[in-house]
Image (cartoon, helix red, strand yellow):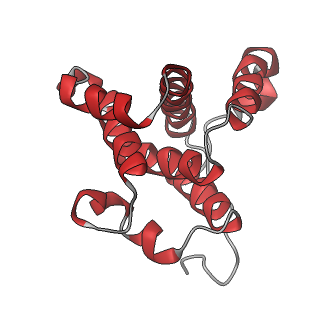
């Protein structure tokens, strides 16, 4: 696969607010591990290899286990995730698939049980941001880094 273009090279000014939003969300009080799970799950739904690669690597660096990363796309069937993480993952799926789900009341009610109003806003912005990054990476065919030993022949 070959990249169509590199967004950062051609429109750095347009991406600057997105990068600032990322910094703000990183320091918002949401747990780093939760942030990476949300970014990875949305990226799985969207099929964004670039972002899955990045956020699983970041999650591992933050101490996330391989087992939880392997089971993330089946989180509903696994006891490895906390109630707070489950609420965030359900909200992530609801908003990533918003045209289908319309953000169901039951998902919002569960979110409200585990997140303060400010955390709800920050989480929602996080979900919106990763979906925007996914669209940039998929649309412009961003290619994730590949180690020589991992590359297909």
Up the image or down, 35 lies above or below 11; here it is below
Task: Choose top left, top right, bottom left or bottom right for residue 104.
Answer: top left
- Relative to 46, does residue 59 appear above or below in the rendering? below
Report whether 28 appears left or right of 94. Answer: right
Q: Quadrant of the C terminus?
A: bottom right
| Figure check: 33 above or below 149 | above
On the image, the x and y values in percent for residue 118 come to 56, 21
Q: Position of residue 33 (x, y in %)?
A: 59, 54
Counting from the top left corner in percent of width and height, residue 71 is at 36, 68
Whether residue 146 can be seen here: yes
Give residue 122's quadrant in the image. top right
Q: Is residue 114 or residue 95 the one in the foreground? A: 114
Q: Is residue 47 visible in the rendered structure shown here?
A: no
Q: Which residue is more in the foreground, 143 or 70?
A: 70
Which residue occupies 71% across, 66% down?
61
All told, the count of numbered labels is 0
> Observer-nearest residue: 16 or 27?
27
Identify the residue at image location x=57%, y=39%: 137
The extreme bottom residue here reads 149
Q: Quadrant of the N terminus?
A: bottom right
Residue pictured at 28% horizontal, 67% vertical: 78
In the rendered image, residue 6, in percent from the top left (x then y), is placed at 71, 35
Q: Viewed as shown, does residue 63 lie left or right of 153?
A: right
Q: Residue at x 48, y 31 (%)?
A: 127
């Amino acid at each position: 696969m070959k990249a169509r273009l590199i967004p950062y090279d051609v429109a750095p000014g347009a991406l600057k607010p997105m990068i600032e939003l990322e910094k703000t969300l990183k320091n918002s009080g949401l747990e780093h591990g939760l942030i990476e799970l949300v970014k990875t799950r949305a990226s799985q739904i969207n099929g964004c290899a670039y972002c899955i690669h990045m956020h699983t690597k970041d999650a591992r660096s933050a101490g996330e286990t391989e087992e939880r990363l392997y089971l993330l796309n089946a989180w509903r069937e696994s006891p490895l995730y906390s109630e707070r993480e489950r609420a965030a993952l359900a909200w992530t799926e609801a908003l990533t698939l918003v045209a289908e789900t319309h953000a169901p009341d039951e998902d919002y009610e569960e979110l409200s049980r585990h997140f303060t109003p400010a955390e709800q806003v920050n989480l929602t912005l996080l979900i919106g941001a990763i979906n925007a990054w996914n669209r940039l990476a998929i649309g412009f065919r961003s290619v994730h880094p590949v180690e020589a030993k991992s590359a297909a022949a």
